[in-house]
Amino acid sequence: MTLIRTHTCGELTREQTGETAILNGWVGTRRDLGGVIFIDLRDRYGITQVVFSPQDDKTAHELADQLRPEYVIGVEGEVRQRDPINVNPNVKTGDIELRVKKLVIYSRSETPPFEIQDDLKTNEDLRLKYRYLDLRRPAMQRNLMLRSALYRHTREYFHEQQFAEIETPFLMRSTPEGARDYLVPSRVNPGKFFALPQSPQTYKQILMVSGMDRYFQIVKCFRDEDLRADRQPEFTQIDVEMSFVDEEQVYTLMEGLLQRILREVVGAQVDTPFPRMTYKEAMTTYGSDKPDTRFDMKFVDFSEIVRDSEFRVFSKTVADGGAVVGFVVPGMGSLGRGVMDRLTKRTRDEIGAGGLIYIKNNEDEIYSSVSKFVSEDMTRAMVEVSGAQKGDLILLLAGSAETVYGQLGDLRLLMAREYDLIDTSAYNLLWVTDFPLLEYDSEDGRYYAMHHPFTSPRPEDVELLKTDPGKVRARAYDLVMNGSEIGGGSIRIHDTELQSTMFEALGIGKDEAQQKFGFLLDAFRYGAPPHGGIALGLDRIAMLLTEAKSLRDVIAFPKNQRAISLMDNCPSVVDQAQLRELHIRLAPGLDSADK
Amino acid sequence: MTLIRTHTCGELTREQTGETAILNGWVGTRRDLGGVIFIDLRDRYGITQVVFSPQDDKTAHELADQLRPEYVIGVEGEVRQRDPINVNPNVKTGDIELRVKKLVIYSRSETPPFEIQDDLKTNEDLRLKYRYLDLRRPAMQRNLMLRSALYRHTREYFHEQQFAEIETPFLMRSTPEGARDYLVPSRVNPGKFFALPQSPQTYKQILMVSGMDRYFQIVKCFRDEDLRADRQPEFTQIDVEMSFVDEEQVYTLMEGLLQRILREVVGAQVDTPFPRMTYKEAMTTYGSDKPDTRFDMKFVDFSEIVRDSEFRVFSKTVADGGAVVGFVVPGMGSLGRGVMDRLTKRTRDEIGAGGLIYIKNNEDEIYSSVSKFVSEDMTRAMVEVSGAQKGDLILLLAGSAETVYGQLGDLRLLMAREYDLIDTSAYNLLWVTDFPLLEYDSEDGRYYAMHHPFTSPRPEDVELLKTDPGKVRARAYDLVMNGSEIGGGSIRIHDTELQSTMFEALGIGKDEAQQKFGFLLDAFRYGAPPHGGIALGLDRIAMLLTEAKSLRDVIAFPKNQRAISLMDNCPSVVDQAQLRELHIRLAPGLDSADK
């Protein structure tokens, strides 16, 4: 039978000296010293040293001889202070040990395929296969506990703010817009399929039409996407929608949430309101719609200065409507020729930019990598405009507006990481606003919604929808933390006419719109409030707060990069009979389990 | 643009008299009196009377003439006390009205297919199709808000108790045990399928093996079942698992939760510990494994008394090992012949019991429906043993032990409901314990796990597993509220050997076990703690607390009884192209969307 614990392994201190205590846990390291057995007993809460000595109890001591790592045991004994020389000041329980009088072995363990410790040097596939052992490591336990705290404080915040927590369906209608749906055949409705939600977007808008006023939910979403390095087929979203609001109410609410989360979960302080930046400003200043503003290195546009340069790369780029842009890397003017050559190569290979140009603004001389083609005066003028100090390095790229900012943005990040220019203790939050409503896809010859087709255009741009759709700005916003997009949302369209205009701009005809989104359009006919919302990526936030290297390190049972769970080996083949029940067959050439 | 509200429609009182306020909401009833327009403006928080008069603002008054029910508007105006004669004491805002100076119409509404009011007499299909209108009704808003509070207090409780909230996967391995899995074809792993969880059972046990110690989650589960009256294909579970516990720790924890929920959500007080009853006692005393103990009417066994009766129905039943059992219905001895005949018919038609026998223990006489066959002495003895008072009615059934208790249990409920013998203000909670571990299926000629194959047998019954499996009692428990099972759980097997014995008893071979549950069995080889848990049905609890008639009334977007969502009309046919991408085809004779 189970010895019901009186304390956890992270709890006993000098205060309990002399008391009898019962602990349960996993056997960690074991040392035998002069006929006495010392065990580090581990549970989620900590580690306590337990001691088996023939003096304390002969039976327990004999049984303890069988103990091996990862055995699960219960022990009852007396709390004693350790000898001063054995005190471990790094552990809460480091002052004491438990002298065992009774031992129960609940279960034994084979030798684990890897040790249960944080500095683990094993491949990730093995960790994922033996996830139950991987999760025993203190670092993984901390990650999951932090994630648990993240749920808690997020929900408390929304409940305090009068939000209704409402579950939306997982078995919903397939809407073939955007990324790919997971489909679910229905056994009782032959030939018909549900889809798993890519987001509860339509339902949360319906809830606003239903008068629920303020809705939130922490909810799983699904995307059967082509696999990318750090994506999961199922991911968790903090989903929010509010009625009768403008952008400002959404900003204020979410700023309060992030402030609360950072304070309660990692003890960090952030000021509100968060800075805001339009999409255009973000692109032309940082070359990214999710700029990392923990470091400066803002872009400088040299196009005007170099417009008439004899250097064709400069003058032709500007003449063709492109830009010559760059940024200053503080204190890096001393980088040697070899380093700069390697950087030039990386800029080409990793970033895809044609040619890196640089100027070293050093005390003794101004060195330009294109001094053969660009006059000293012009170089000097560029240094001046850049604001570079003596000892700084200026990096430049020339190219079309569509590509050069993004490439320079990548180069900016590369430099910051390479030379440790990021203050990693900071939590830097900002809003990026005024995204374009539509993106033109030249392959398909049509516009697509950048966010989704329910995003409202800015009122002053509505007229452009019919004349110059690419210019229309959306009432859409992204929340960015430390250079990662952690969420995005918008004020939605709540007017059936405007929604129709939007569908027209997207080339979605009346029938198609009705077929895909009919129930939402129907709902709008019965009194829809102005509304807007946002969705945050909980996995990503957890990853940033734990400083984990991968989303997989903040998800209890993740899929790997082939969308496979190695622990339970799924997806898997199923029986022919199961498929028959679901009224489906495999495509030709594929086998079921019973063939 | 949106008029940002200063107050909700449930907020303004006399205290704000003279202040300027902005409200948003839906137009309810409208009255025109002497050129002045009165509107009940409604939002989630309440109703406020707003008044449009030419004296206050001519433009607003003119625009207000367009207002119809369910229009969405914003109004700005001055809070005024109503004339004493117009005060409505039933509403929080009943003392005041808002004299409007500015009106914005956000959106108009067609005439809704039904009125937005609580005493709705429309068919449920129409309500489900226009769910966004149905959810505007105050009763539905209350239901969803109560459910939201249920989430909140449940989660707060578990977090306070050091539980880790952990999400388990929705895309998991199909385990063909028990009810039916929803399958999800994988696009990137052709011919392979995920299953949606019927419960996170294996994952929560894995979390215990992972050392997470205390886990909880409020989680959606899925069952592609043959449709029953009040089942949903997706349902919500409060899922709990704990390490190093016996039944007692689970009971204490859950009693605290229910106490907290009832106090915080409906303001009811319940005492702990809850009463306990073995499965056997529940069956022989109430004829149900989820007895409603808000009323008495316990069973009395008359078998011994009637063993030697000349009445063959009695004596043969007892001789064949069956039972003659009944219960007393207090004060119902005066029911007339006609009523008793109808009851006899219902007992046969609705309950399936052969023949209802009754004794009226009235002041003037003891009337027995079988007086022709049963002696007066025996009848008198039966009355005595039953404990019936003068004026009481005794109902009896005779039959095999397998059927008679259940039938009598149904009859007990029928009588209690028919004659209003249930104290509906009470919250009656109890544990039913010691369920049989296994059920014999005579059709399949094998035993099935009554709960699931990971449930631990009682230690003293383990030996019976190999000799008389049907007799083994499980360490399983159900939590019952007001005659509904609201949850069930067990102490699990944590020992690989015992697990193997269990699989043997279930006729599951080594290979089959490895194929189905291999990863859990593997996990047990590396040190599993003793553990146990429970899962509560959140939908059912919400239904009991709201006194809703159907689960559909406490779920925002339910499926109907054919597992169809009428609002968004799913499941639906999908394109051939979509199926091709998923490497599946429809069964012969079924059509896809593009045919």
Image (spheres, coloured by chain):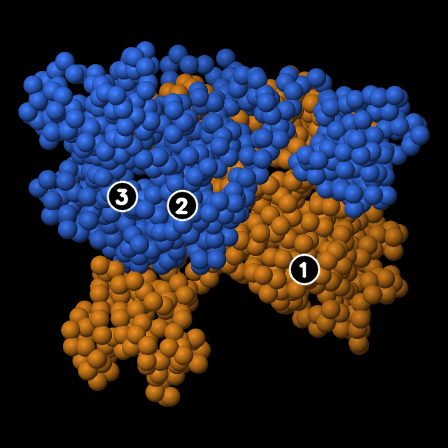
Chain colours: A blue, B orange
Question: Mark 2 — on which chain does it sit?
Answer: A
What numbered label is drawn on residue A587?
Answer: none
Nearer mark to the viewer, of 3 and 2? 3
The verdict on a common chain for dots 1 and 3 is no
Helix, strand or loop for disc 2 = strand
Q: Nearer the viewer, residue B88 or A383?
A: A383
What numbered label is drawn on residue B428?
Answer: 1
User: Which residue is denoted by mark 2 in the rendering?
Assistant: A239
Left-right relation of A547 to A397: right
Measuring from the top left, give residue B426's x and y in whole percent.
65, 65
Q: How many marks?
A: 3
- Between the C-alphas of marks 1 and 2, the distance is 36 Å
Nearer mark to the viewer, of 1 and 3? 3
User: Which residue is denoted by mark 3 in the rendering?
Assistant: A277
Regarding residue B470, the answer to whether it shows in the image is no
The residue lying at 15 percent from left, 51 percent from top is: A460
Left-right relation of A593 to A500: right
Q: Amino acid at mark 3?
A: Met
The residue lying at 84 percent from left, 38 percent from top is: A80
Q: Amino acid at mark 1?
A: Asn
